[in-house]
Amino acid sequence: MTRETGLRRSLGVREMTASIITITIGGGVFLLPAGVAQTLGSAAWVAYVTCAIVFGLIVMCFAEAGSRVSLSGGPYAYVEQAFGPFIGYVTGVLVLLFGIIAHAAVAAGFTQAINALLPGAGEGVARIAILLVVFGGFTWANLRGVGQGAVVVQVGTVAKLIPLVFIGTVGLFAIDGANLAWPGMPAAGDLARTCMMLMFAFFGVETALVPSGEVRDPARTVPRAIFFAIGGITLLYLGVQQSAQGILGPDLVAAKDAPLAEAAERGFGEWAGFMLKIGAAVSMVAHTSGMMLAMPRSVFAMARDGFLPAALGRVNERTGVPAAAVAAYALAVTALAVTGTFASLVPLANIAALLMYLFCCLGVIGLRKKNIRLDESPFRIPGGAVVPWVAAAAIVVLLSTSTATEWAYIGGALAVAVALYALRARSVPKAS
């Protein structure tokens, strides 16, 4: 089945474009400019353009897959239709892994934002206390029932877009041209490693595509929404990086806790810096709220399907919430956020995400071979069979920059997931 029944198809291009932009622009963009500048300096824009090109190839694969498979589940649904239940399951695990690690990374970044507002408050015991209060509060809210964090998410969307648009547009008028002098083309290795880190800021389109079963005319809506959203996001990111680099110059590298706020303050005064600091903090805490609402449902679904302990698949009769799944997810994310940092967790999240994207890009080839399509003609990637392979090759290049230790963590998690799948397969009686 490639089309879902029973769901109301109410999402059009405008709604999906807004959803992709809202989900993709998270806390990472408030912190990553300093790391990009550290490696590439004023050539940082090359990394953004490279990431946009690579991600453009990837999202074209998503666009074609989404126009061929109109099932809720996004990447999991696309890959399962192309390669069967096991590879689909592994893709679903990667989506969950990415969500958990990225959630912890942004939460760790939130403590950096707090540290920028109140120096010392985001370090040591105070940092741990902040994370416990944040995760404890959102866990309690979600155990009471869904919808508790909706207002925070909406406020967070406004709080992050206004300051980012400000620094990415008005900030361009405060730059010193000497800070953007061309230093020469960066070395291929430096560019690849920087792009691997920077991809974190582009991830999120797969989450926005999960409700594909509720999209009007998906063969037209999905690709258009993706292209509009990624184009707008790339322009905003370029403006943000160039403004920060142009205002701070070499000092951008040292502003790791709040690079954009430092740029805004130097360019426009304390009020602008404070606005960016507040925007970063609210954006990250809103991200935490939204993820605490959505991601435990993936844990619940895997338990319901027999891949995790049955207790995690139970729903509280009074609240209608998968309480055990929420609590287990909260413990896992809190532990990661407390023991890791934004800089250490981002590479792990990127490996999980890029592996998932790799399956999706190759999945387009599988969908074509099986001629899986909806009633209407699917979107066809310009360039035919070349783009999925080029996208896959680009992903492999990015993944090759990861360290053995980073691969060991992700590989260990996948090994556990495969073992759970095998145990479930043995426990399910074969049909006679």
Image (tube, rainbow, N blue to C red):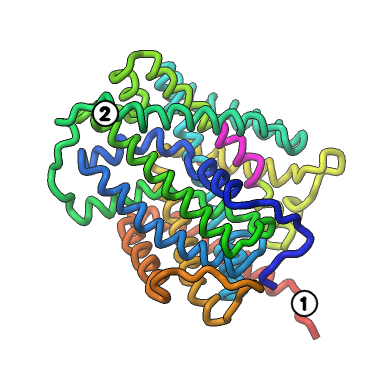
Q: Quadrant of residue 256?
A: top left
Which region is colored magenta? 286-295
Q: Nearer the viewer, mark 1 or mark 2?
A: 2
Characterize the local packing of mark 1: few (<14), some (14-19) or many (20 or more) Cα atoms within 10 angstroms: few
Identify the residue under disc 1. Answer: 429
> In the rendered image of this protein, does residue 402 appear above or below residue 148?
below
Compared across the picture, whether 368 is left or right of 383 comes to right
Q: Secondary structure at mark 1?
A: loop
Front position in the image: 275 or 356: 275
x 39%, y 43%: residue: 344
Identify the residue under disc 2. Answer: 254
| Label at residue 199 | none
Q: Is residue 119 visible?
A: no
User: What's the magenta bit mostly, secondary-structure-wise?
Assistant: helix
Q: Is residue 340 visible?
A: yes
Compared across the picture, whether 263 is left or right of 21 comes to left
Q: Amino acid at mark 1?
A: Pro
Q: Position of residue 261 (x, y in %)?
A: 37, 24
Q: Secondary structure at mark 2?
A: helix
Q: Position of residue 316 (x, y in %)?
A: 82, 43
Q: Position of residue 384 (x, y in %)?
A: 42, 75
Q: Position of residue 216 (x, y in %)?
A: 66, 58
Front position in the image: 49 or 421: 49
Q: Quadrant of residue 309?
A: bottom right
x 44%, y 20%: residue: 275
Q: Amino acid at mark 2?
A: Ala
Tell me if residue 287 is in the magenta stretch: yes
Compared across the picture, whether 3 is left or right of 133 comes to right
